[in-house]
Image (spheres, rainbow, N blue to C red):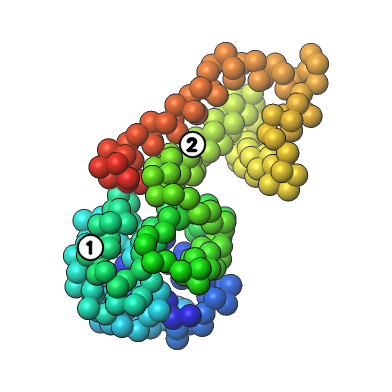
Amino acid sequence: MKIGFIGCGKMASALIQGVLAAKVCEPPEVVVHDKLSEPAEVLGTESGIRVARDNREVAAASDVVLLCVKPEDALPALAAASADLTGKLLVSIVAGVTIDSLQQAAGPECRVVRVMPNTAALVQKGASAYATGAGVTDQDVAAVEEIFTSVGRAFRVKEPLLDAVTGLSGSGPAYVYLFIEALSDGGVQMGLPRDLATSLAVQTVAGAAGMVAETMMHPALLREMVTSPGGTTIAGLAELERGGVRAAVMDAVCAATLRARELGGGDAED
């Protein structure tokens, strides 16, 4: 599979590293262009991928083209490369640009998939959701799955659900970072050294997530397993409920979803 990247930011770099590590393709089969030449040149030197002169060269050399630019740059980038996108699969991770808009800019003979990844792709633990446009084939879906499972997990959804995906997994890492910080602060307040408190908080969150992933049990059942009558855990949980943590997290997902809709005129992500 020959894969091209229009844009070479952090997410594009993570995807490039992921597909190379997973042997989805070899370095000579990856081509990238960025309007800022330095990031692309550095990545090209480090990984052996090809650096193109412009977006048209990326499109012409690729079977699959990933659009990884800022929203304001997306449609102009596609318009410049549209002549070479005929018959190609375009995969966009651009915030707030709908499949219809992408299709119009890329041309009617280009097949379009829109993806909402998250930053955990940088450590191969990403959660991505994707929606397909008209004419996308089973082979195209398999290619998208192969690319995004190389940096985590990928889930197929209808395009309108990408807003809710944004509110949950797109913005979700920030919620978890805040919780880790709060756990660490609580440990420090009770006398633990900061380094130890943070390490314990990180491992605790990672372990709890791993338990859910490995057992596939409902989180409520796992919570019950560590909540003894009259014990320390129920005392802590009572304080979380008193502070409205559950409702606050739900409200955060809803607020981020609504903001995504505002930014994209109904179908955006942030």
Q: Position of residue 191 (x, y in %)?
A: 64, 26
Residue 108's place in the image compared with 194, above or below, is below
Answer with the quarter of the image where residue 258 lies: top left
User: Which residue is more in the foreground, 227 or 95?
Assistant: 95
Answer with the quarter of the image where residue 239 lies: top right
Q: Residue at x 32, y 36 (%)?
A: 259
Q: Position of residue 95 (x, y in %)?
A: 32, 52
Answer with the quarter of the image where residue 202 lies: top right
Residue 4's disc is: none
User: Which residue is more in the foreground, 2 or 157?
Assistant: 157
Q: Residue at x 29, y 73 (%)?
A: 109
**CA distance separating discs 1 and 2:** 35 Å
Disc on the earlier residue, 1 or 2 = 1
Q: Position of residue 260 (x, y in %)?
A: 33, 40
Q: Residue at x 70, y 16 (%)?
A: 235
Q: Mark 2 belongs to which amino acid?
A: Tyr
From where the camera sits, is residue 161 visible? yes
User: Residue farthest to the bottom?
Assistant: 28
User: Residue farthest to the front?
Assistant: 135
Q: Quadrant of the C terminus?
A: top left
From where the camera sits, is residue 9 visible? no
Residue of label 2:
175
Badge 2 density bin: few <14, some 14–19, many ≥20, Cα 10 Å? some
Q: Position of residue 135 (x, y in %)?
A: 38, 66
Residue 104's disc is: 1
User: Which residue is more in the foreground, 267 or 239?
Assistant: 267
- Count of marks, rendered view: 2
Dot 2 falls on a residue whose secondary structure is helix
Please state which of the two labelled residues, at mark 1 or mark 2, is closer to the viewer. 1
User: Which residue is more in the foreground, 91 or 104?
Assistant: 104
